[in-house]
Image (cartoon, coloured by chain):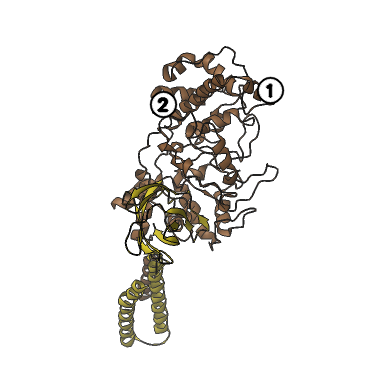
C-alpha cells in the first residue's frame, strides 16, 4: 500500500512538474518590456500650439471641456461623450451629442501622443481635433462666430490674459460658419477676410486651450505594468503583480501566435496607424470608408499643420507632409486603438460593432473578409481556452 | 529544434531509464503476480506523466521563432540591372520604431562615381501583412557626393519591411530593394 502511495505521489509530482507556470524566452521578455508603461517617453512639446504647456491655458481648456455652454442648445460639452469617470468615453456604440453620430467615442488617455485624431485620422493635431465636434451638427452643433462671441462674453478676461486682445466684434454676425446651415454659411461669406481670420484665430485658440488641458490625461500603470517591471528586474512579484497561469498564457499568445502585438505595440499598445481588419459596417449608418475619405478632409482643414493658425515652423508637419494619400489599404482602414483600459469599456471598434472582448477575439481569429478593401488579418486557429486566455490577459491592462 | 532534441536526449531518457531499472530490481526481489502488474502499471503511468510534463514544459518555454532564414538585410547593394551601387543608412544611425525618420541613400555608378541629380521614387511595405508603407517618404535634399536625404520614413511595427527605390539619372533607370527587419 505504501508503495502504491509512493508511486501515486511520484506520478502527481511528475504531472505538477509539467504544469508549473510557463517561462518567457529572452525575445518574449524584450517584447513585454517594450509594452510596459515605464518605457513611455516624456510627452513631447507641441510646437504647433505655443500654449500647450501653459497652465492658464490648460485651466481655461478644462473649463471649456466641461462647459455645456459650448454647444448650440446649451446641453452638450466635450465631457458629455468624454466622461471623466469613464476613461473619457461614454460606453455607447455610437456617440450621442445633439444628435446620434456614426462613430464610437474614443477614450483620451495619452491622446496628446497621437499623430492623427478620430478613428480615421481626419485631423492632424489635438487642437484641430477639439474644434471639429464644436461645429458638427450631431455633436455640439455650434458655429464659429457664436463660439467667439461666447468666449468674449463669458471668458473675455481669461482669454485675453492667455492669448492677448480679442478682436473687434463690431459687425461680426452672431451666427456664422463656413460649415453651418445655409444662413450661417451666407453670413460667413459676407464677412471680410480680416473678420474671418480674426474669428478663426479665436476659434483656433479655443482648440489650443482644450488641447492644453487634454495633454494632462495620461494612462495610469496597470497590473500588467507591475508584472512587466518585475519580469524585467527579476524581482519577486507580490500582490496583484502576480499573474495567473491563464494570464501568462494569454500574454504569450498576445505577443506570439495571435500576432496582436504586430499592431498593438509599444507602451500604448498601438502603432498609431490605420488598418482594415474586416470590421463589418453597422446597418442604418451612413456609408463609412474610414481613412481613405479622411485624407481629403485633413488636407482641406484650415486648422491643419500647414494652415495659418499653426504656431512654430512647418518642421512639425511631417505626418501631414508625408501622409499616404492614395493607397488601396486606406479603404475601411481605422486607427489601431490603445488597449489600455479596453477591457472595462465595451463596446468595441469604430462604431461599437462588438459588445465584448470575446467577440473581438473571435472576429480576429475568424478574419472575415472586409466588405470593401482587403482585410490585413489572417485567420488563426485559437481554441476556446486560448481565447479565454487572451481575454484574461487583456483584463490585466484595465486593473 | 536542436535545443529541444538535446534536452530530451540528455535529461528525460537517462532519468526514465534509471527509474525503470530501479523498479525492475524491486520486482525481482519482492514478488510476482497481480501486485507486480500494478507496480508496472503505476510506474508506466508515472513515466508517462513525467514525459508529458517535461514535453509540456519544453513546448511552452521554447522560443517560437518561425523564420529560420531571414531576408537579406545588407545595406549596400547593386541595383537590379547593375547600373548603380546603392547604400541605405538611417541618418541617426539607429532605427526607432514608430517615429518619422530620415535615411540617407548614397548612389554610386559601377565605376564608383557619385550619382548626381537622380530622380528617386520610394515605395515599399510589409510583404507578410498585405500593406504598403504607412507614410509616403520622399527625397528632400541632395547632400553632395551621391548622398540623398529621404524624409518621412516610419516603421510602425516590428517585422519584415521592404523599401524599393526607382532611380533615374543620366546613367539610366534602375531599381533596388532593401529589406529592413525590426
Chain B shade: yellow
Q: Is residue A348 visible?
A: no
Instruction: Please report the residue visible at 69 percent of the width from the left and 26 percent of the height from the top.
Output: A182
Q: Pointers 2 and 1 in contact (CB under 8 A)?
A: no
Q: Residues within 10 Å of mark 2 (few under 14, many from 20)?
A: many
In the foreground, A291 or A261: A291
Which chain's residue wears label 2?
A
Indicate the quadrant containing the C terminus of chain A: top left, top right, bottom left or bottom right.
top left
Q: Residue A175: x and y, percent? A: 63, 19
How much space separates mark 2 and mark 1, taking CA atoms? 33 Å
Residue A51 tag number: 2
Whether callout 2 and callout 1 share a subunit is answered yes
Q: Going by the picture, which residue comes out furthest to the right?
A: A284
Q: Going by the picture, which residue comes out furthest to the front?
A: B170
Q: Going by the picture, which residue comes out furthest to the top?
A: A170
Determine which residue is flagged by label 1.
Answer: A183
Chain A shade: brown
In the foreground, A239 or A66: A66
- The mark closer to the camera, 2 or 1, is 1
Local secondary structure at mark 2 = loop
Above or below A190: residue B163: below
Above or below B153: residue B83: below
Q: Residue B18: x and y, percent? A: 30, 80
Amino acid at each position: 500500500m505504501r508503495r502504491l502511495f509512493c508511486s501515486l505521489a511520484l506520478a502527481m509530482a511528475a504531472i505538477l512538474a509539467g504544469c508549473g507556470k510557463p517561462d518567457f524566452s529572452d525575445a518574449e521578455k524584450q517584447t513585454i518590456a517594450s509594452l510596459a508603461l515605464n518605457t513611455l517617453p516624456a510627452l513631447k512639446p507641441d510646437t504647433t500650439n505655443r500654449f500647450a504647456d501653459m497652465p492658464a491655458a490648460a485651466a481655461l481648456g478644462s473649463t471649456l471641456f466641461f462647459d455645456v455652454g459650448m454647444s448650440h442648445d446649451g446641453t452638450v460639452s466635450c465631457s458629455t461623450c468624454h466622461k471623466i469617470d469613464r476613461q473619457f468615453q461614454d460606453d455607447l456604440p455610437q456617440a450621442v451629442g445633439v444628435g446620434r453620430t456614426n462613430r464610437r467615442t474614443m477614450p483620451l488617455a495619452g491622446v496628446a501622443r497621437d499623430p492623427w485624431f478620430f478613428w480615421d485620422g481626419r485631423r492632424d493635431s489635438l487642437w484641430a481635433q477639439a474644434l471639429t465636434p464644436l461645429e458638427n451638427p450631431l455633436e455640439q452643433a455650434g458655429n464659429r462666430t457664436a463660439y467667439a462671441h461666447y468666449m468674449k462674453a463669458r471668458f473675455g478676461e481669461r482669454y485675453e490674459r492667455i492669448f492677448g486682445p480679442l478682436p473687434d466684434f463690431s459687425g461680426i454676425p452672431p451666427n456664422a460658419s463656413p460649415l453651418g446651415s445655409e444662413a450661417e454659411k451666407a453670413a460667413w461669406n459676407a464677412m471680410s477676410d480680416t473678420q474671418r481670420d480674426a474669428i478663426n484665430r479665436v476659434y483656433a485658440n479655443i482648440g489650443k486651450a482644450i488641447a492644453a488641458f487634454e495633454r494632462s490625461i495620461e494612462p495610469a500603470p496597470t497590473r500588467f505594468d507591475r508584472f512587466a517591471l518585475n519580469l524585467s528586474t527579476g524581482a519577486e512579484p507580490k500582490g496583484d503583480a502576480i499573474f495567473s497561469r491563464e494570464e501568462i498564457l494569454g500574454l504569450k499568445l498576445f505577443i506570439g501566435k495571435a500576432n496582436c502585438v504586430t499592431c498593438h505595440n509599444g507602451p500604448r499598445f498601438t502603432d498609431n496607424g490605420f488598418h482594415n481588419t474586416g470590421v463589418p459596417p453597422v446597418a442604418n449608418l451612413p456609408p463609412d470608408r474610414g481613412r481613405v475619405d479622411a485624407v481629403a478632409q485633413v488636407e482641406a482643414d484650415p486648422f491643419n499643420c500647414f494652415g495659418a493658425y499653426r504656431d512654430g515652423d512647418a518642421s512639425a508637419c511631417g505626418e501631414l507632409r508625408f501622409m499616404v494619400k492614395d493607397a488601396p489599404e486606406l479603404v475601411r482602414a481605422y486607427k489601431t486603438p490603445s488597449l489600455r483600459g479596453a477591457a472595462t469599456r465595451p463596446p468595441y471598434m469604430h462604431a461599437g460593432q462588438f459588445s465584448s472582448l470575446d467577440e473581438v477575439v473571435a472576429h480576429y481569429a475568424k478574419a472575415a473578409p472586409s466588405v470593401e478593401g482587403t482585410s490585413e488579418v489572417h485567420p488563426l486557429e485559437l481554441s476556446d481556452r486560448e481565447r479565454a486566455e487572451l481575454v484574461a490577459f487583456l483584463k490585466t491592462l484595465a486593473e | 529544434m536542436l535545443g529541444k532534441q538535446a534536452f530530451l536526449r540528455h535529461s528525460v531518457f537517462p532519468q526514465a531509464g534509471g527509474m525503470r531499472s530501479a523498479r525492475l530490481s524491486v520486482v525481482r526481489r519482492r514478488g510476482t503476480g497481480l501486485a507486480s502488474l500494478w507496480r508496472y502499471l503505476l510506474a508506466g503511468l508515472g513515466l508517462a506523466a513525467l514525459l508529458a510534463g517535461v514535453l509540456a514544459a519544453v513546448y511552452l518555454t521554447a522560443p517560437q521563432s518561425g523564420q529560420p532564414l531571414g531576408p537579406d538585410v545588407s545595406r549596400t547593394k547593386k541595383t537590379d540591372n547593375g547600373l548603380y551601387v546603392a547604400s541605405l543608412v538611417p541618418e541617426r544611425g539607429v532605427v526607432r520604431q514608430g517615429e518619422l525618420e530620415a535615411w540617407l541613400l548614397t548612389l554610386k555608378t559601377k565605376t564608383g562615381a557619385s550619382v548626381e541629380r537622380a530622380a528617386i521614387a520610394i515605395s515599399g511595405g510589409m510583404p507578410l501583412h498585405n500593406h504598403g508603407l504607412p507614410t509616403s517618404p520622399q527625397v528632400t535634399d541632395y547632400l553632395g557626393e551621391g548622398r540623398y536625404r529621404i524624409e518621412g520614413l516610419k516603421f510602425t511595427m516590428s517585422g519584415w519591411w521592404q523599401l524599393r527605390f526607382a532611380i533615374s539619372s543620366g546613367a539610366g533607370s534602375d531599381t533596388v530593394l532593401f529589406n529592413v527587419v525590426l
